[in-house]
Amino acid sequence: MEAMPLFRPYKMGNFKLSHRVVLAPLTRQRSYGNVPQPHAILYYSQRTTDGGLLITEATGVSETTQGYAETPGIRTKEHVEACKPIVQDVHDKGGKFFLPDLACRPNFQPNGIAPISCTDKGCTPGLYGVDWTAPRRLSIDEIPQIIDDFRRSARNAIEAGFYGVEIHGANGYLIDQFINDQVNDRTDEYGGTLEKRCRFALDIVKAVVEEIGADKVGIRISPFADYMEAGDSNSEALSLYMAESLSKYGILYLHVIEPRMVKVDNIYETPYSTLPTRKAFNGTFISAGGYKREDGNKAIDENHADLVAYGRLFLANPDLPKRFAIDALLNKYDRDTFYTPDPIVGFDGVEIHGAHGYLIDQFMKDQVNDRNDKYGGSLENRCRFALEVVEAVVDEIGADKVGIRLSPFANYMESSDSNPTALGLHMAESLNKYNILFCHMVEPRMKTVAEKCQTPHSLLPMRKTFKGTFMVAGGYDREDGNKAITSNSADLVVFGRLFLANPDLPKRFEINAPLNKYNRETFYISDPVLGYTDYPFLESIDQISN
């Protein structure tokens, strides 16, 4: 049976690709201080397949041409070193990793300095709800430095381990501004005719090709788009001219963003076709622009593209190629989280931490709380702060997304209570009024009685009182956890140190495999690997059984 078009193998220059689903460059604004962060290792690793092509988010070539705040740079040794573990992880999984070089849009103002552009005309006031400061027109003498910034950044990308670079000439960034006649009003050798407007882009291509080789260079263009009012009066001619000119340099690929679809007689269609551009370019042709599974297969099958790049769908579905292969349902993306600085937004819910001597726990415990106002004194008053926090969080995100952790029997940081059973019961009863999802309670510390370890108190009364899911924690091992579930003392069992040292703990419990020992000395150190991500997994169930 013939593979579906998106899963036909493809050879892109020296790179053998196992499928044609490409990760498009996606700006995420999570590189604090413009330095790639360790959380990007997981982000790109999740989207890596053996033989798959990934293009990182666009990366700044110089401080004055950074595209957005908190986006990565590739201009310094610090940037290069920060990229290396990210790239290595993708390579270890067989991915082909390219880095896009970009320069700023006319709206980005680092440190209040006017952004650079081919023009000094600002965007229309009120565009996207913002009154933009006019950019500063690049002088003819400054342009060689910008071109050299692209060259040096391309070299840095190769040093970091990337297989190649994608020059970002799309979406209203600096190269796109020069190319389009609705922005470029220059009268020198970089403005006026189509050939002159494209000179800046082609000068950059030439410099990068000479630095790292044509077989490692691609470019992204969006001739049919008008991002930040960077449109062109004859986008088809522009697209064809760029394709023909780029072919002379023998670059690896051309990545073109499709025209936006318009509705005609209740049918969505594109007003222009990139097929002439595809035919004019001699290398690999990548198409992007709101494709779905069916559209992508059709584009490959009809030879409109060699590869199809996916952005938002890949963002929300890190295993997108697998989902496409089996025609599985797709997660929906959330636009509100596209550009937030949080590296891990998108949690399914929250657990309010009311345990272990933290602030909420301090308010609840009578050995700490000596207040004489409405937040101190009686049990009800001492629990008021915790319950008001619960109420506020429930009102904000919904009770079905809220849990709380409590440790009524613990005395962390001398935060204890004279009657922990009464405290635990009162909280369990009070939490029921808010219908929260779960209560996560820490067991009392075990004590040795008649040479046997046992807990001096029981959580069973709280378990019977609380109406939602009841989770227990506190030094459980495999046998204790199974006993807690079978005796109906808990719905779920939480493991801490054992899970830390055994990232595949559920599998080990299932087959009763030996456990790694945890190392207390690495619990709270700042090293991003030691004692954090370096505990070994089981190599395979077969090896353990043998």
Image (cartoon, rainbow, N blue to C red):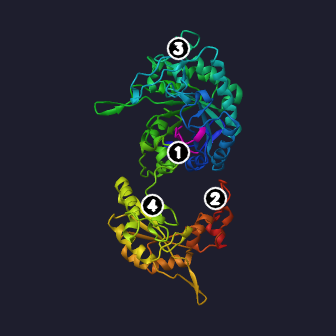
**Numbered label tally:** 4
Q: Nearer the viewer, mark 2 or mark 4?
A: 4
Residue drawn at x 55%, y 44% is: 19
Vertical arrangement, residue 116 with respect to residue 509, above or below:
above
Vertical arrangement, residue 531 with respect to residue 216, above or below:
below
Q: Nearer the viewer, mark 1 or mark 4?
A: 4
Farthest residue to the bottom: give it.
450
Q: Is residue 93 left or right of residue 437?
A: right
Q: Is residue 50 left or right of residue 236?
A: right
Indicate the amino acid at tag 1: Phe
**Label of residue 7 in the image:** 1
Indicate the amino acid at tag 4: Ile
**Label of residue 532 in the image:** 2
Find residue 177 and report its horizontal and vertical position in percent: 51, 21
Question: Contact, CB < 8 Å: mark 4 with mark 3?
Answer: no
Q: Earlier in the sequence, mark 3 or mark 1?
A: 1
Crowd around label 1: few <14 · some 14–19 · many ≥20 (10 Å): some
Q: Earlier in the sequence, mark 1 or mark 4?
A: 1
Mark 3 and mark 1: span between their CA atoms? 38 Å
Find residue 266 and report its horizontal and vertical position in percent: 29, 33
Instruction: Say what secondary structure mark 3 lies in.
Output: helix
**Label of residue 352 in the image:** 4
In the picture of the structure, the residue carrying the numbered disc 3 is 194
Mark 2 and mark 4: span between their CA atoms? 24 Å
Toward the viewer: 260 or 454? Answer: 454
Check if residue 20 falls in the magenta segment: yes
Q: Earlier in the sequence, mark 3 or mark 2?
A: 3
